[in-house]
Amino acid sequence: MTENDLPDSLIRTMRNARRVVALTGAGISAESGVPTFREAQTGLWETYEPLDLATPEAFERDPRLVWEWYEWRRKLVDAAEPNAGHRALVELEYWLPDFTLVTQNVDGLHQRAGSRSVIELHGNITRSICSAERTPIDPGLTELAPPPCPQCGASLRPDVVWFGEALPAAAILDATESARSCDVFFSIGTSSLVQPAASLPEAATRSGAIMVEINPEKTPLSSRADYVLRGPAGEVLPALVSAIYS
Ligand code: BJW
């Protein structure tokens, strides 16, 4: 996608917008080599369904398996670099008077790209917490999988939100508040299937926001978006930013 393929009316809307929210999902990190959830895994983990491992039940059943899966993903994230899509959102934050980035991703790549105002809905894979006390703990260097909490002996777990668990209250509250008060809401690289994140676009449009989806594939949100930009975020976002500010 080039600047010329973008609707003029969207460029005008963005030039006049004051408050903008972007909700991102795994698709924005795909071009950094971080696998999405609903696409096939490779190698060691190809026989596992990622969504079956992202549950408290899976951790109870087989803590070692789940810890090792997260260790594998941590290494992927450590080795990954932010891509042009992440960087375009840093630029949007720079130009706009009020910009909030809400992410479902746990990889920290937005922050590493330089985004400042980031709301993490599903936690962060680089942190660990005690599964009993929920306090943040640095597991240090250890062969144990999972390592025990040095205070109470319970297993450590990644500081992420699994299915059936509540999102951090402040994060979902702030995200909903931002969605309700924005002029333009972007949904980028998410399948729009997982609640409550999937309800944020509706909260925005109910309050009168223009909604834009960026995704190479159709999602349940596509038919409700004012603009659908079909393509990878790493191409569409830089083209959009350059069309708005050139
Ligand atoms: C590109 C691209 C490129 C590719 N450029 N795009 C209401 C109705 C129905 C169900 C529920 C409901 N409320 C709650 C539920 C249950 C459940 C849920 O939503 N289930 C549905 C699946 C049916 N929700 C929950 O359980 C949530 N908890 C909750 O609501 O608790 C209530 C509660 C309250 C009080 C007390 C107790 C409980 C928690 C949800 C947590 C989700 N966790 C995960 C794992 C995080 C940790 C980890 O990373 O391992 O979060 S699951 C997984 O899905 C992960 C993601 O953040 C999330 C969303 O996935 P995402 O980002 O959309 O990725 P994909 O793979 O699905 O899509 C990628 C997209 O990118 C695709 O569209 C591609 O086309 C696109 N793409 N390349 C742009 N280059």
Image: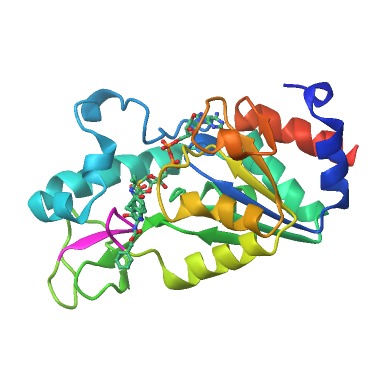
Image-based side of 112 in relation to 122, left or right: right
Q: Residue at x 33, y 25 (%)?
A: 40
The residue lying toward the viewer, choosing from 143 and 109, is: 109
The residue lying toward the viewer, choosing from 79 and 24, is: 24
Image-based side of 100 in relation to 69, left or right: right
As displayed, is residue 131 above or below residue 27? below
Can see residue 105? yes
As displayed, is residue 152 above or below residue 6? below
Is 158 one of the magenta-colored residues? yes
Q: Residue at x 16, y 63 (%)?
A: 155
Can see residue 115? no
Q: Position of residue 115 (x, y in %)?
A: 64, 54
Q: Residue at x 48, y 49 (%)?
A: 198
User: In which image quadrant can residue 35 be found?
Assistant: top left
Image-based side of 210 in relation to 27, left or right: right
- Quarter of the C terminus within the rendering: top right
Is 62 one of the magenta-colored residues? no
Kindly give the residue lying farthest to the left in the view shown: 61
Q: Which residues are magenta?
A: 155-165
User: In which image quadrant can residue 227 be found?
Assistant: top right
Q: Position of residue 49 (x, y in %)?
A: 24, 33
